[in-house]
Image (cartoon, grey):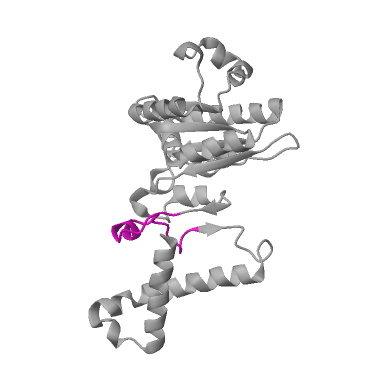
């Protein structure tokens, strides 16, 4: 998915992408780098990245490369892992303001960014807050998220991967992160266990654009009705498992049939 999005932005729209790997494994970073070269997204003269490439991004762009990779690997210090996200964001701002480009930035993983901040906070001797997170959790996330803005010269759009500890969406870290996002896609282990892919949870996945102010009334009503139908289907699961489908009323059996069709349609 990352490769497809980066390619479409580069080839179809002439945009630039950045990938910020926070706490990534060395192997994963190397694999991504190799895939980028194979697809022609990264073009390196004589197969090497020179010091000039790093110091003068305009020369890097002249070689037709359409992506910048920035990694703070999992074996590096918490300070390095924390700052790599800001470094990638500063590069995105540079390409937006200096070259007037629309920039797409991937961050994998935002939770690792907060985790690195927690380690730094511990080293500084700060008293932890809820669940052991740093007391500056909210302000650190705000200082990072609020820099994703559009100007008259260009825009920065971010797609962020978020690890949810123990699948607990009420954990302070995901709660703070979700508050800054325009749309959230939550993947469900239970849906994956059913063989439904992509395993997108329709109950916890949200979008601020799902609003009558942006959509037609019909679109909004259909989306709302589908979520209500799936919610009712979820409530009937225990009854079906214990008593069987035959014990449901005619209307509930019709609802279950429709809900299962919607599940298959969304997979």
Quarter containing the N terminus: top left
The majority secondary structure of the magenta stretch comes to: loop
Where, by quadrant of the figure, is residue 33 drawn? top left
Between residue 41 and residue 199, name the one nearer to us.
Answer: 41
Q: Which residues are magenta?
A: 186-205
- Does residue 248 lie above or below 132 as drawn? below
Residue 193 locus on image (x, y percent) = 29, 58
Between residue 195 and residue 92, name the one nearer to us.
Answer: 195
- Residue at the spot 59% in from the left edge and 72% down from the top edge: 221
Between residue 216 and residue 144, name the one nearer to us.
Answer: 216
- Residue at the spot 54% in from the left edge and 27% down from the top edge: 87
Residue 23 locus on image (x, y percent) = 39, 32
Residue with the most extreme right position: 152
Residue 227 locus on image (x, y percent) = 48, 69
From this viewpoint, is residue 78 visible? Answer: no
Q: Is residue 196 magenta?
A: yes
- Residue at the spot 31% in from the left edge and 58% down from the top edge: 195
Between residue 123 and residue 208, name the one nearer to us.
Answer: 208
Where, by quadrant of the figure, is residue 163 drawn? top left
Residue 159 locus on image (x, y percent) = 52, 43
Quarter containing the C terminus: bottom left
How many marks can you see? Answer: 0
Residue with the most extreme left position: 242
From this viewpoint, is residue 255 visible? Answer: yes
Q: Is residue 220 magenta?
A: no
């Amino acid at each position: 998915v990352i490769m497809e999005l980066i390619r479409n932005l580069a080839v179809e729209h002439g945009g630039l992408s950045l990938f910020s790997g926070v706490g990534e494994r060395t192997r994963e970073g190397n694999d991504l780098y190799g895939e980028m070269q194979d697809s022609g997204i990264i073009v390196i003269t004589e197969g090497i990245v020179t010091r000039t490439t790093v110091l003068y991004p305009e020369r890097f762009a002249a070689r037709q490369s359409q992506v910048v990779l920035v990694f703070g690997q999992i074996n590096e210090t918490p300070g390095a892992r924390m700052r790599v996200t800001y470094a990638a964001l500063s590069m995105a701002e540079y390409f937006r303001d200096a070259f007037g480009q629309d920039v797409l930035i991937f961050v994998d993983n935002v939770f690792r960014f907060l985790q690195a901040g927690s380690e730094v906070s511990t080293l500084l001797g700060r008293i932890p807050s809820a669940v052991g997170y740093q007391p500056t959790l909210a302000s650190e996330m705000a200082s990072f998220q609020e820099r994703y803005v559009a100007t008259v010269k260009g825009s920065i759009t971010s797609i962020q991967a978020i690890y949810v500890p123990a699948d607990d969406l009420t954990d302070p870290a995901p709660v703070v992160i979700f508050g800054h996002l325009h749309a959230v896609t939550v993947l469900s282990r239970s849906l994956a266990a059913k063989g439904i892919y992509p395993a997108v949870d329709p109950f916890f996945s949200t979008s601020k654009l799902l609003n009558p102010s942006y959509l037609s009334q019909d679109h909004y009503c259909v989306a709302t009705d589908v979520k209500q139908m799936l919610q009712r289907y979820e409530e009937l699961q225990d009854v079906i498992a214990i008593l069987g489908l035959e014990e449901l009323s005619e209307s509930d059996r019709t609802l279950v049939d429709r809900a299962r069709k919607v599940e298959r349609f969304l997979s």
